[in-house]
Image (spheres, grey):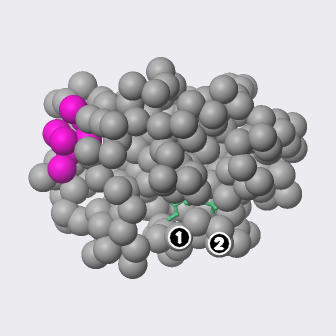
Amino acid sequence: TAPIRIAPSILSADFAKLGEEVRAIDAAGADWIHCDVMDGHFVPNISFGPDVLKAIRPHTAKFFDVHLMIAPVDPYVEAFAKAGADLISFHVEAGAHSHRTVQAIKAQGKQAGIVLNPGTPESAIEPLLGDLDLILLMSVNPGFGGQSFICSVVEKIARVRALIGERPIALEVDGGITPETAPLAVKAGADVLVAGSAAFKGGPANYAANIAAIRKAA
Ligand code: DX5
Ligand code: ZN
């Protein structure tokens, strides 16, 4: 089995010093950098856009895992690709043409991921399995960091792991991941864990211990 990757979400970083924060979380052992993009329309909060991504890109060589919580998606794919995304994921609920969006991401030479809200059944993405690099299952309703893990998602993780079968698709879980919930997600089949508040809690002096605690529990 693949090693578990930890993807700290910079949504929980100090936005006043984002470059420093990204360097600190990189040095603390982050595998990927998870970038939560919110538009105040698809989700009830606004975070940051491609220019911020571009500004932090020189501060780390780590993989940029860009989670778009926006609708529409297609008009912005090129901007996020050019800003330095390595993988772009978008919500299946965000539009009627998911397959087209996956192709648009691939046309930019980037990995493509699709995201399911807690209430969306996995059947929605079955036809896309052959084209995906990653599936992201939300374990909170997207929009805010610091919410509690929705336990009913654990069964969906297991079902999606079975759907993936032998395909080289990463299975990521996002929302409420802590040392307590991480093992539930991993046992069910997740191999990438997003952690916002649990990774960034206590400031830079604690980042390495925070990440290590999640990794150890997982
Ligand atoms: C939720 C975001 C998550 C979230 C994770 O809308 O997609 O990435 O910020 O934060 P925690 O780990 O605090 O739930
Ligand atoms: Zn996210």
Q: Which residue is drawn at 29% across and 52% down?
A: 49
Q: Residue at x 55, y 53 (%)?
A: 14
Magenta stretch, main secondary structure, is helix
Residue range (magenta): 76-82
Residue sitting nearer the eye, 202 or 217: 202
x, y percent for residue 149:
70, 68
Is residue 74 shown left or right of residue 143? left
Q: How crowded is mark 1: few (under 14 residues within 10 Å), some or many (20 or more)?
A: some
Asked if labels 1 and 2 touch by Cβ distance under 8 angstroms, the answer is yes
Is residue 21 shown left or right of residue 107? right
On screen, residue 134 above or below 86:
below
Residue sitting nearer the eye, 50 or 131: 50
x, y percent for residue 37:
37, 56
Residue indicated by mark 1: 144
Q: Is mark 1 on a helix, strand or loop?
A: loop
Residue sitting nearer the eye, 156 or 26: 26
Q: Residue at x 63, y 36 (%)?
A: 25
- Residue 78 visible, this orientation: yes
Q: Residues within 10 Å of mark 2 (few under 14, many from 20)?
A: some
The residue most toward the bottom is 44
**For disc 1, does the CB lie below 8 Å from ligand 1?**
yes
x, y percent for residue 163:
54, 46
Residue indicated by mark 2: 147
**For disc 2, does the CB lie below 8 Å from ligand 1?**
yes
